[in-house]
Image (tube, coloured by chain):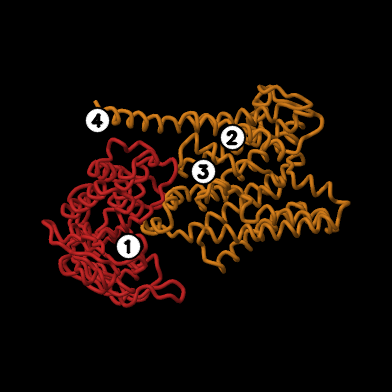
Chain colours: A red, B orange
Amino acid sequence: MSRRSAPRPGGTGGGARVEVLGLTAGYGRTQVLDAVRLTVEPGGWLAVIGPNGSGKSTLLRSVLGFHPHEGQVRLDGVPTTGMHRRDRARAMAYAPQTPVLPEGVTARDYVTLGRTPHRPLLAAPREADRRVVADVLDRLGLGSMAGRPLSTLSGGEQQRAVLARALAQQPRVLLLDEPTAALDLGHAQQVLDLVDVLRRQDGLTVISTLHDLTLAGQYADRLALLSGGRVAAEGPPAEVLTAEALSRHYGARAEVVAGPSGPAVLPVRD
Amino acid sequence: MTTTAPRARAGTARSRGRRGSVAAFAGAGLVLVLAMLAGVGVGALPLPPGAVVVTLLDLLVRPFGGSVPGALEGAQAAVLLELRLPRVLMAALVGAGLAIAGAGYQGVFRNPLADPYLLGAAAGAGLGATLVIAYSPVQSVGPVGVVPLAAFAGALVGVGCALALGSVAGGSHSPTLLLAGIAVAAFLAAAQTLVQQQNTEDLREIYSWLLGQLGSSQWSDVTLVLPYLGTAALVLLLCGRALDVLAVGDDEASSLGVHPGRLRLLVILAASLATAAAVAVSGLIGFVGLVVPHIVRRLVGGSHVRVLPMSLLVGGAFLVLSDLVARVLLAPAELPIGVVTAFIGAPFFAGLLWAGARRR
């Protein structure tokens, strides 16, 4: 697989086209995903939305290869199943919904973990790794707190540190599971703005789950609505986010109003 | 002002961290050496530290045809070389082995309460030792005593059962494995108690083994456990960086190219080998494997790259000092070393916790 050379130390080799073909997965005998088919263009941002239990996280974990599944995931046409774990780690980075922040580890050391797939597992970080880490920390505004233990950072700063760790991997695809779940509106916007800037600068492909539908519609360029393990709708936000879809799949009463930066979901009370 | 202040503080914190951990390693190494010198010097027949150093140097250069004047001779040399030196070396090896095994277990389970005896190693060793003390017609097989042999085998069988049960019940997922370990340990401990109650005439011997002892250490014991402890420690040291990756969770470790299941198995096997070797020659010495890694993390931070080697040094020094206290406090009687480790270790650890809380 050819990798374009990185334009800057903390940048990446550009985004990859992600294809998910007939992905079926479950827990024990319970089927959670049923023949899911999705395509994300290089540099695109797909937000996976859907009611609780619709299989959003399972979809992300299956694409990453953590969850046993049938069907195929392709990066630029190459199936990930045959890829070595480390090659896959260089192509795809992941930030889980509730990241484990190890005790007594500084932000810099934590972000340096992102360099793991780029060097032998026994080797110490090299000068090139340190440069990438320093650059990523600066881009995410964490430079001044690099030496502080993670536990002393605020929730927003911790979320940025998790993002920095994923970016230090210099991936071509960034998979984010509810990146704003623990954040208030202001910090959520900050993180999503940041992801958008990084995506535009590096051409990174982003796949995220987002439970806030309005934010999902404002930031992602395509939405995929999962319901009952199937893709119920897929397309630009204005096409997917409709009052009818919200009622049918979420059992929610809501209006969808056209806003300046995308459709906004307005809950309605009887 | 507001932007430069944190930056400056972060800078000094980092350089202090690097320099601090170099100093911590040098300090721990020095403490270990001093503890071992004290360990070989102090006793019913006191040996002057200078002469001890000269004797050891003489021993080192002798194979190359050299000699250092002023070495100990006669009874003093015999006490040093045949009694104290193997005992002190054994204390250092066992302490180092238990401490690094504890650090490995705590890293793999991401649980600060994990210790080397968690997965049934202690209960298995206890059952093995009790069985041969009660029933074995022979004392040794060749040069090796049956008790260490049975304890070593028992420890490995205990951990093996826990791993087998864990993998049947839910793969290498760590909470399942922990519960499997608890089940196995409870069963083996019950079996041990049963055997013990049926053989009350051996109670004293069984009990003194369970409490741990280093008094009978000989050179043959040192050479017996050294290969196992050495191999296990080397494997664990090499796993340091991978354990740091595992610390962020199984999914994220996977996304970083590490195989959590395989890494967990490798670390558990290495740590269990170290534990089995230590337990075989010294019995069940508690507290070292649980607490030393915590002390170490307070000294050098949370990274396993530093915690694992530092645990070797601090664990070794801690057990050498504990053994010294065990020999000296009620001389000529000896305290069980397991009692001493807890007596010294618990207040020391409480003090560390208190100091840590005050700093915060």
Is residue B25 shown above or below A198? Answer: above
- Residue occupied by mark 1: A88
- The kind of residue tagged 2 is Phe
Tally of marks = 4
Residue nearest the observer in this picture, B316 or A42: A42
Q: Position of residue B282 (x, y in %)?
A: 71, 45
- Residue occupied by mark 3: B308
Q: Position of residue A119 (x, y in %)?
A: 35, 52
Determine the CA span between mark 1 and mark 3: 29 Å
* Disc 3 secondary structure class: helix
Determine the CA span between mark 2 and mark 3: 19 Å
Quadrant that contains the C terminus of chain B:
top left
Q: Which is nearer the N-term, disc 2 or disc 3?
A: 3
Q: Is circle 4 on the same chain as circle 2?
A: yes
Tag of residue B321: none
Q: Quadrant of residue A82?
A: bottom left
Q: Which mark lies nearer to you, 1 or 2?
A: 2
Q: Which mark lies nearer to you, 2 or 3?
A: 2
Q: Position of residue B108 (x, y in %)?
A: 51, 52
- Residue occupied by mark 2: B349
Q: Is circle 1 on the same chain as circle 3?
A: no
State yes or no: discs 4 and 2 in contact (Cβ < 8 Å).
no
Q: Position of residue B106 (x, y in %)?
A: 53, 48
| Residue that extends furthest to the front in the rendered view of this protein | A270
- Residue occupied by mark 4: B3
* Disc 1 secondary structure class: helix
